[in-house]
């Protein structure tokens, strides 16, 4: 089959969709991408995939997205695509609006919904209205947590048979995170030396976008409290802002909110291509997001045997077993976040037990193969159905 993968930005395609695209290509399908502007286009093309540039914006209320609907409506039949697979709400709304009257199979990976408590009421209402209109016309909706799967049926009226739960986010944990104890120790020593961190310094790592929606303000306040009670504690920030990001936290803004005393103990690294060494360097990972579809960095930390502290979102609940593999705290509660971080930094035995349990759980549930198996099952069923229809017609 000819498959068009649609994302709003190339980074989403590179991080979450390329593994599926490669598996489909290995299975004999032809895969192309349609995406908006941004970093990552060159990398996707270097992997041998054709990329169609579209005027897609991550913000839903722009004229550009109306142009994107028209462009996709022309591209899909001209490219003779059999399947259109959209990712994230903005791109999915555009792609399904463009393709719903065309002779094409429609798939949607809901990498995160707006149904959680972290979204304002008007966003939840609008998201529900869109999914009620388009979700029931989608051949399969893939969700990344059980709560979104249930809401697709209950709120949007999507038939239960058309909803599939992916066990480990949109792509699963990459093999590079499943390292041996010896390799993790080597990475830890090398990275701590490079960053100027002491061998025994308590280190917390944050990996992800540095935006308000990711809880950066809460993290700043929490670390200020932590630093006042733990003299040697360090915070390692690995990430940055995407193009067009709202509520961006620059290094300067974050350090200003942390405060002068604690700012000296923040190591700000920006976006990095290779994440495992940074997780290896830390004692635990923190994720204070207000909204999360699937806590991929939580699963990646688990694969490396690190316990986690996270705000209790849908995505965190899909990954963390509270008290066993990590701790969950209320969203936007800096005091509770600081207390949880201090608890695990001080109780090294407990943290070690959690890390070991997290790694075992990750190996059982969060592998890339587990996600690709669900995707490929659906694609193979569509291929069989198309072949049967062709033989009859």
Image (cartoon, rainbow, N blue to C red):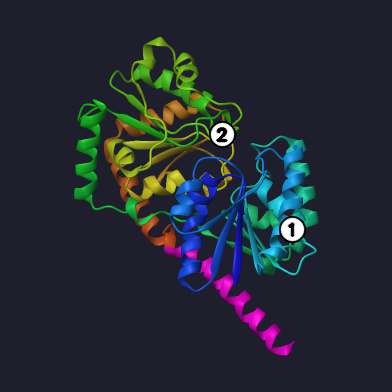
Residue 109 belongs to the span the image colors magenta = no
Which disc is residue 138 wearing?
A: none
x and y, in percent, of residue 303 in the image = 35, 51
Residue at position x 36%, y 59% in the image: 363
x and y, in percent, of residue 316 in the image = 51, 44
Left or right: 198, with 214 as reference point? left
In this rendering, does residue 156 appear at all? Answer: no
Position above or below: 259 against 357? above
Viewer-proximal residue among 304 and 72: 72
**Residue of label 2:** 243
Position above or below: 279 against 149? above
Please report the bounds of the magenta region as a residue range. 369-393
Q: Is the C terminus in the top left, top right, bottom left or bottom right quadrant?
A: bottom right
Q: Is the N terminus in the top left, top right, bottom left or bottom right quadrant?
A: bottom right
Residue at position x 20%, y 37% in the image: 189
Q: Nearer the viewer, mark 2 or mark 1?
A: 1
Position above or below: 111 against 60? below
How dense is the environment of label 2, judged by Cα within 10 Å: few (below 14), some, or many (20 and up)? few
How dense is the environment of label 1, judged by Cα within 10 Å: few (below 14), some, or many (20 and up)? few
Viewer-proximal residue among 390 and 77: 77
Which disc is residue 74 wearing?
A: 1
Q: Secondary structure at mark 2?
A: loop
Position above or below: 137 against 386? above
Residue at position x 49%, y 28% in the image: 336
Q: Magenta region's main secondary structure? A: helix
Q: Secondary structure at mark 1?
A: helix
């Amino acid at each position: 089959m000819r498959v068009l993968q649609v994302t709003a930005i190339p980074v989403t395609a590179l991080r979450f969709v390329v593994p599926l695209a490669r598996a489909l290509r290995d299975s004999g399908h032809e895969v192309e991408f349609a995406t908006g502007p941004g970093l990552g286009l060159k990398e996707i093309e270097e992997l041998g995939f054709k990329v169609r540039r579209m005027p897609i914006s991550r913000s839903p209320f722009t004229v550009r997205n109306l142009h994107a609907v028209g462009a996709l409506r022309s591209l899909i039949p001209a490219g003779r695509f059999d399947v259109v697979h959209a990712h994230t709400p903005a791109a999915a709304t555009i792609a399904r609006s463009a393709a719903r009257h065309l002779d094409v199979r429609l798939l949607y990976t809901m990498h995160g919904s707006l149904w959680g408590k972290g979204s304002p009421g008007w966003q939840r209402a609008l998201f529900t209205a869109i999914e009620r209109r388009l979700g029931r016309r989608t051949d399969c909706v893939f969700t990344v947590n059980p709560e979104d799967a249930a809401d697709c049926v209950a709120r949007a009226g999507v038939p239960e048979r058309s909803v599939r739960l992916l066990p480990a986010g949109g792509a699963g944990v990459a093999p590079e995170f499943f390292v041996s104890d010896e390799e993790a120790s080597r990475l830890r020593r090398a990275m701590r030396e490079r960053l100027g961190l002491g061998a025994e310094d308590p280190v917390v790592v944050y990996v992800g976008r540095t935006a308000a929606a990711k809880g950066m303000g809460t993290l700043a306040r929490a670390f200020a409290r932590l630093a006042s009670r733990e003299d040697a504690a360090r915070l390692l920030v690995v990430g940055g802002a995407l193009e067009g990001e709202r509520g961006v936290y620059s290094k300067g803004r974050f350090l200003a909110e942390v405060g002068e005393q604690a700012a000296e103990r923040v190591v700000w690294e920006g976006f990095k291509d290779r994440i495992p060494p940074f997780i290896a360097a830390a004692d635990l990972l923190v994720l204070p997001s207000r909204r999360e579809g699937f806590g991929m960095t939580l699963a990646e930390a688990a694969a490396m045997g690190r316990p986690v502290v996270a705000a209790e979102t849908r995505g965190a609940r899909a990954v963390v077993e509270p008290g066993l593999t990590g701790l969950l705290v209320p969203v936007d509660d800096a005091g509770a976040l600081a207390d949880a971080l201090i608890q695990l930094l001080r109780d090294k035995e407990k943290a070690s037990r959690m890390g070991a349990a997290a790694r075992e759980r990750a190996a059982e549930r969060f592998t890339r193969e587990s996600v690709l198996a669900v995707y490929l099952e659906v694609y193979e069923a569509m291929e069989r159905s198309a072949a049967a229809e062709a033989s009859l017609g």
